[in-house]
Image (cartoon, rainbow, N blue to C red):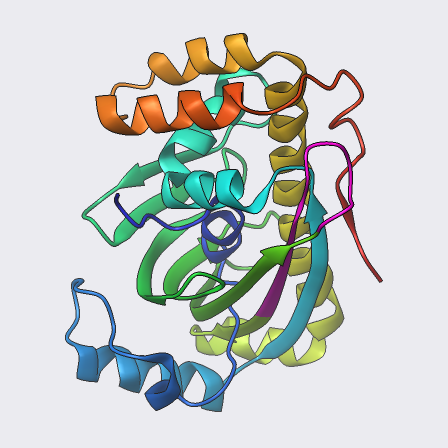
Amino acid sequence: MKKSPPLLVALAAAMGAAAFAGTPEAMGPPAPGPFTPREFTAAVRETNDKRTIRIVVGPAITALPLALSTFLLDHADLTAFLIKRRNIAPYKIVMRGPFRAEANDGADTQGFITLLSATDHRRVYYAEGVHHSSVFPDIRADAVIIMTTEDAPGVGSLGATKSTFEVTVRARSRVVAKVAKILKHYLRKMVDAKFRRAIAAADRVAGAIAQDPDGVLADASAFPALLAGDQEILRRMILSLPLDRRAGSGSGKIQP
């Protein structure tokens, strides 16, 4: 199964949001990508050392069992396709290799994200992105993202997943970096808003899966990049869930 960036992470990374926890050496070996492991380690260290802001978003609750959430994380391009097809948001994610993707939120942010390491409950990503603003110069940034996930038992009839994002942003442009020192509050609000929007979109997908499983499976079958084997895995996962007309539409939330 391919390990593509999770939707929530990819969309935030597209505008330069990132998370950093621990030292680069503690992350494990980077996945193959456009840079060498040594170059990635240096980039991670530099992003942290020269950070502009650092925030934590979450924990966020999404009304899907952890196994299905993980499948959607591993198929972020499919998840973005479902979100756009259902008119939830104009997201687009295109895989540029087994561990690298290009993400665009359809509005003002875009970029690339590469998976560095992954375990069952923790993923580390390196991102390069740009946020286009009508007020400020383009905000270009390097980023490192750490996402942790865990099962949230007892939340909703379908089960749920709890996700937390530790976020650091490093503005690259000298002009933007100087502005960012003055407008850190603006940057924090922007990053937080991007994550919240993506989390809300993911929760609406969860609601669609619970309320209209056959329709979601039909939508997924229209995605040309989904392999037949993965399509069958998704079908079994979704059809094993109880039909829940109440799921989604606000069931997801970000805890204070």
The relative height of residue 112 versus residue 20 in the rendered view (above or below) is above
Is 205 in front, or is 100? 205
- Image check: 150 left or right of 254? left
Q: Is residue 54 left or right of residue 15?
A: right
- At a point 46% along the width and 46% down the height, the residue shown is 70
Q: Quadrant of residue 59?
A: bottom right
Q: Quadrant of the N terminus?
A: top left
98 is higher (above) or lower (below) than 75: below
- Residue 221 is situated, as x and y percent measured from the top left of the image, at 35, 13
Q: Residue at x 47, y 85 (%)?
A: 48
Q: Which residues are magenta?
A: 153-166
Q: Nearer the viewer, residue 47 or 30?
A: 30
Quarter the C terminus occupies: bottom right
Task: Tell which of 71 and 167 is nearer to you.
Answer: 71
Which residue is found at the position 30% from the left and 50% from the top?
3
Residue 56 point in image, percent of width and height: 67, 70
The reply to whether residue 225 is visible in this rendering is no
- In this view, 242 is above or below 47: above
Residue 198 image-quadrant placement: top right
Q: Is residue 87 visible?
A: yes
Where in the figure is residue 19, as x and y percent of width and height? 53, 71
* Residue located at (53% from left, 53% from top): 12
